[in-house]
Image (cartoon, rainbow, N blue to C red):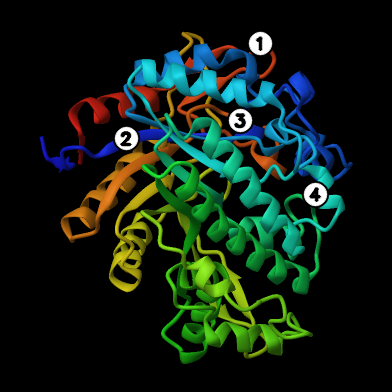
Amino acid sequence: MTGYDFPQGFVWGTATAAYQIEGAVHADGRGESIWDRFSHTPGKTLNGDNGDVACDHYHRWPEDIALMADLGIQAYRFSVAWPRILPSGRGKINQAGIDFYSRLVDRLLEHGITPFLTLYHWDLPQVLQDSGGWPARDTAQAFAEYAGIVGRALGDRVKHWMTINEPWCVSILSHYMGEHAPGLQNPPLALAAAHHTLLGHGWAVQELRREAPACEVGIVLNYTASVPASDSAADQAAARRYDGFFNRWFSDPVAGLGYPADMVANYSAAGFLPDGMNFVQPGDMATIATPTDFLGANYYTREVIAAGETDWDWQLVTLDTERTAIGWEIYPQGFYELLLRLYSHYRFPKIYVTENGASYAEGPDSAGRVRDERRVRYLRQHFGAAQRAISAGVPLGGYFVWSLLDNFEWAKGYNDRFGLVHVNYETQQRTPKDSFAFFKQVIAENAVEE
């Protein structure tokens, strides 16, 4: 057998997000989130799907942790729902929400599973959206207060914390492209939201250091490989612009490099900054660059980029290549190159792959088996890319497969299935897929067959 061995102590896990799996949106004092409002707005999600029930994890979490234990994962990345802790966004704490996550953490630890807690995976309390949302500086301060509350409650047991999941999605996808809650299409607000998301991250790191000084803290950024469609100077310049739009605008400031000057110029030329960078106040960039213990990197695919109609634009090119069911190209080489770049350019002290996985629709066959060979192949290829990056010197500490369960896939509703475990949304029956068995063997052997 040929394959790849991983270092001793390498952490294998799975990842989920609160709104995608918990359901129980009205239970035990939980407040309304922007995703409750957005998903109940006609035309915003596929088939009008919403997360009201999702995987009913709020009630079925003991069963789900038993699945994790059977899988053999060493760590579980989950998010806390801000509206469960602070139904009004700030102020009065909902103890029932604290108690739910406390029970979850305790059971994980009983099974030897290390909790990796994400504070914000997109479920902003609606009351904060009504008062300005992420484009408003006050939301960053409210997030820091929330971080401190959760840190005080769980920091005695949770030692690995992530502040914000995918600021690009929180800001650009949600405030410029309008595809995610709150569904705005306002470029200046999108860039203000990006800044305040990063600022909230910096303040939250400082709060967590005070409340849980023994913990490790990081942020989770999503990445795509930006590849020029040709060797032409125009296509290469466009690919760099797209890289700035998707990757560098967030990585650079977190790493202490400030906002990339070429993208400030591009956004200005595009009319995205009519008042300049007036949302940046003295001291903000130092706060955003507050040192972290690790970077969480999410990777799924690449984009092939050609020159646009202007010198600040670009075009996405779709090649006739293998893709997952959600339409994302399978490109593990981009994953390898990304990991090398994150370390060689930014020198993050440790990197975790906090999300990677594939959407395929296979369900149980007549024998009750889910034969998702394509997901197994996808994971094997990306595990191999990660190991090659480790061999090249990247300090990769662990790998979290997205996702443990099929779940509510945001604007895509329940159409796309990323889970290692199939969920029948009518009965809530869980059925481990062939990819579950494959990943179980990888974890047990700390190696993957080529």
Q: Can see residue 328?
A: no
SS state under label 3: loop
Mark 3–mark 4 CB contact (< 8 Å): no
**Residue 184 horizontal/vertical position (percent):** 81, 60
* Residue under the point 31% across and 43% down: 398
Which mark lies nearer to you, 2 or 1? 2
Mark 2–mark 4 CB contact (< 8 Å): no
> In the rendered image, which residue does mark 2 sit on?
12
Q: In the rendering, which numbered label is found on residue 427?
A: 1
Using a 10 Å C-alpha cutoff, classify the residue at mark 1 as few (fewer than 14 neighbours), some (14 to 19) or many (20 or more).
Answer: few
SS state under label 1: loop
Which mark lies nearer to you, 3 or 4? 4
Mark 2–mark 1 CB contact (< 8 Å): no
Which of disc 3 and disc 1 is earlier in sequence?
Answer: 3
Q: In the rendering, which numbered label is found on residue 128?
A: 4
Which of disc 3 and disc 2 is earlier in sequence?
Answer: 2
Q: Is residue 16 left or right of residue 36?
A: left
Q: Nearer the viewer, residue 277 or 226?
A: 277
